[in-house]
Amino acid sequence: MGFELVLLWLVTAVPCEKTPPPGMVCIEGGEAIVGADDHTAAEKPRHPAFVETFYLDAKEVTVADYSRCEREGACPKLKRPPYYARFQKPELPAVPVTWDLAHQYCVFAGKRLPTEAEWEKAARGPEGKTYPWGNEAPSCDKANYKGCPGDSTRPPGSYPPGAYGLYDMAGNGYEWVKDWWTPCYNGCDKACGEACLRANPKGPCDGARPCKGYTQRVLKGGSWYWPEEMLRGSWRRGERPTSGLHRLSFRCASTAPQLSAWPPRFMTEPPARLADPKPPSEEERAKALAVVEDTEVFEIPLCGRVGKARVDCRDPMSYIKSNEVLQYLFGDAIENVGGGYVGLGADQGYSYIAHARSQWAWLFDYDPTVVRLHHVLRAVVKRAPTREDFVAAFTDKQVKATRAAIEEEWASLPKEERAAISGVFERARRQLWANYARQLKPARWTQGFGWLQTDENYRYVRLMFEQGRIIAVKGNMLTDKALPSIARAARSLGVPIRVYYPSNAEEQWKQLPPQYRENVRQLPFDERSVILRTLISRKFHKSDSYWHYIVHGGLHAQEHLALPGYANVWSFMEDRHQVGAFFATTTAAAGTEKAPRRERYIDFLSYIGVPSAVSSAVAESKP
């Protein structure tokens, strides 16, 4: 604890923005007084905690607010039995609300639930007072609690504001916060300990779920239903997240002054079309090529089952074509974002590069066959003026010419490696031809997405190859070589990585390995950066969808990868934004691609461009 308290003074709070989001107030970071020594065991011990600058709703979320989320299809309907009728006026706090509903509303609003430390700092003020109004005893002209007239909730703002201009931080509706409940902060059995005492505390598992051994979330501030002893800012109570009674309410917080609400930034502020990059200088090329390959990829043992990979073995299947057939769902999120592209896999990366108009691209894979396929494609694309010429290079008539092109392009490599690259072409060319010929055919429903769908897309990829801006490397995302060196190369070029594509690799691991977490955190992301992730499991969605297409704000990912509680990729999915949806089924018949059939309901998640965004489209597509 002592070491952590020293750290409190080393963190500099970001100052408040002059204009906070509508309906919110800014609470500048600094020391918060949390807990108390002279009340219940759950409040012990009183201690300082550093809290970063954040934004908090000035008032509790109302029935009218929540109803808007219901109408948008993003929030389940509140249970409104007849005996709760008096609580359902639009101007009253939204009750009865479970923790899950509160969390879901905050995500819909582009916000999040506050942590317990944030909530307590807001309620007690910069001096850590007992109540929002100070240390004086409660009275019915200060708060709404048991014994006061009315015997019900009252419209938020009915009482004078407390610290920071916030209303009803004591009484009215009991308020959910993000943290998991523990019986005390420190000094008792099953205490929260360091998770509650370090700088910017978030409690057990950093508030993420699942959190083994924890089943309750924290409620703060008392309510109209409970007596005055529960009005203290330090008062805390555990409650099942599924509990929703007529005194349980909430308010939302945000880390950033820009909210991650619908519509997303790529819709409201779409980037302009970028001009073609100019040929790089020799210095720039040297910086881009200063990457370290994982030569050990040749030595990674094969797993015993096709379609599965672990940290200690790789999938025995070589994916020379993608089975993620609805990649165009990512299109709007990356169009014209420029910057750098980093991704694994076969030719799908070229579609992302073309759509994003990436300025530099690093393609990596731990499968030597896939890396050698990129070498084949580089040789062919540079010598094929049109996309039709490119596809023709894989036909029987062009075998000799394509083989010669590979030899010419990679003449500097050892003979054995040239033979291995040619071997990939020889073994897979018929399958590749069928794949590329299919991609060549117009599909209006893709809206021009795909590197072989339009002449312009193909021209751009060819230009990138000709200028040496596409670099394929043997890379294992779990080591300290390829990905960290790509991050260093991008930084030396002054290029932000705007698109990172790990496909569904992350869900193959039960835990996100520490080295991988660090590798992603090193990538130079900015507010336009996104991670394009696919998930094949049904863990976070009750539908029978096959693929889930996830767009994840890069800064949000990096921020949360630093938190041990976000142990695997599923931890992020709780923060997904749900605003409408479709199921899509793609079928192929007689060699023609049919448009997706849209029906029923799924998730479509939202905002890209601020650190608090996870976005997703979920679609059913059988490869």
Image: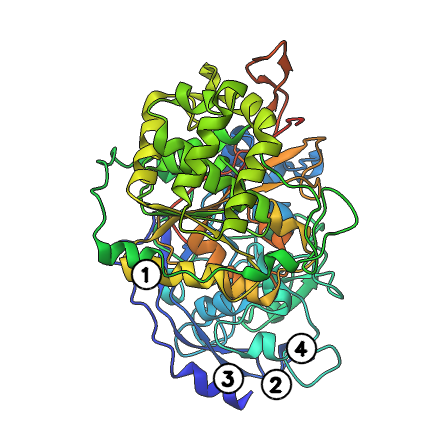
Residue under the image location 47 percent in, 76 percent down? 136
Q: Which residue is mark 3?
A: 4
What is the three-letter code of the residue carrying label 4? Answer: Cys
Dot 1 or dot 2: first in sequence order is: 2
Residue under the image location 42 percent in, 45 percent down? 410
Residue 38's label in the rendered image is 2
Near mark 4 (Cα within 10 A), the count class, few <14, some 14-19 or many ≥20, is many
- The C terminus sits in image quarter: top right
What is the three-letter code of the residue carrying label 3? Answer: Glu
Residue 49 is situated, as x and y percent measured from the top left of the image, at 48, 78
What is the three-letter code of the residue carrying label 2? Answer: Asp
Q: Nearer the viewer, residue 146 or 296?
A: 296
Left or right side of 304 for 320: left
Dot 2 or dot 4: first in sequence order is: 2
- The N terminus sits in image quarter: bottom right
Q: Quadrant of residue 213?
A: bottom right
In the depicted structure, whether residue 280 falls above or below residue 116 = above
Dot 1 or dot 3: first in sequence order is: 3
Q: Which residue is mark 4?
A: 184
Q: Which residue is mark 1?
A: 491
